Amino acid sequence: MTIRHFVTHQISKDPKEPAATLHCSEQEADFDDEHSERFYSQATSQLKGILTQRAGKRYGAFHPEVTLMRAQIQDWKGDRQNFMSLTRRLSKYFANSLDNTEFAIDGYLAFIYEELADSDRLYVFHLRRKTSVSINADMTLTETHYIDFSNTGFGVMINLTDWLVQEEEKYITFSFGRADKPLQNQFGDFMGFTDTLDTAAETEAFLQIVDEFSQNLPAEQSFEYKSKVVDYCMEQDKRGEAVDFTDLADYVESQMESKPESKSGEDFSHYIVEKQKERQASKPALTPEQMAEQGAPTAQVAEAIKTELIPDRRKLKSFIRYSGKNKDISLSFSAAMLEGDVVFDGVNNRLQINKLPESLIKQLKAQKEDD
């Protein structure tokens, strides 16, 4: 059992009312009770999965000038307050930050503390509930409420180990739920979250290197190679894990009939690391080699070389597919079809499609016959 604490507090705010309402729980989860422990474990597992698998995630740290949440956590870790007191105070301060605003919130704030083998983690989730009907033991109907996991709001994971030992600058993961972006930004401001990793820009730079490498491959390998790269990165992102370039190269090689190599004979992992070194060397900062010579920690050298990537899922998707829509049409096709079965006329902004899906052809022919 890795979950040490689980507490929920109810919070609501009507945009027409000046103040938020907070109802704090009187007790934590009872992990000594077998049935209770099972429910909380299942809920934690589901919430962690939601945070991990969402495409909309940001990575960062506490802003040095916004100290409220950081100070409260430090008091808790320093045994100057217990976990229940920590969650009540954070909930109260967040509720107060909503006063005299037009924000709307309804649901619960769930605080979870988990101890793993390699790190301690604090989670905060905005939970919403649904109302339904259940059958009692006497076969009568009654109203019931349950957590609507599919409609979970924001989720935050703070890697306390990385933060307290100050080895990382991206120890906070901020996961966005559906809609409510202004409210979620409000919580980010309240906790003092600041982005330290631009995953979209990092992914775009990575994909540019992938594209450069693919241009050195035989034509029949190029698109297959890019597709395999994207497949691997997408799976890693869904698992909440970074993409290690060496592991990526091994995966792509195992999935293709022949090993992809550039014209110079370099494999992908070596190629991309060298490219990252070139880009790092073009900046005023020290090169990875210079950092190593001066005794910099291995973690800092690895960060400078960028031997791994936290990918942005939306950038990955757009790399091998073109898509767009308006109120009348929705279109998506593989990038491999461009200038083949799909031809773009940039002068007149026209797209010629020479290979239509069979299902669409049948629909169009059926409509033609009806006319």
Image: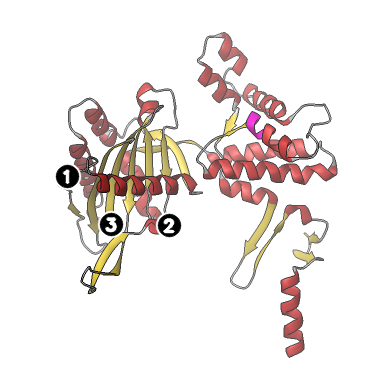
Q: Is residue 102 visible?
A: no
Q: For mark 1, does the 10 Å Cα neighbourhood hold few (<14), some (14 to 19), or many (20 or more) residues?
A: few
In the image, taking residue 275 as reference, residue 341 lies left or right, namely right
Does the segment drawn in magenta span residue 234? no
Residue 75 picture location, percent across and down: 22, 29
Secondary structure at numbered mark 1:
loop
Label number found at residue 137: none
In front: mark 1 or mark 2? 1
What whole-number distance in Å separates the C-alpha atoms at marks 1 and 2? 30 Å
Label number found at residue 27: 1
In front: mark 1 or mark 3? 1
Classify the position of the N terminus by image quarter: top left
Where is mark 3, residue-wise? 107
Magenta residues span 245-249
Classify the position of the C terminus by image quarter: bottom right
The amino acid sitting under disc 1 is Gln
In the image, taking residue 100 as reference, residue 52 lies left or right, namely right
Secondary structure at numbered mark 2:
loop
Q: Is residue 79 visible?
A: yes
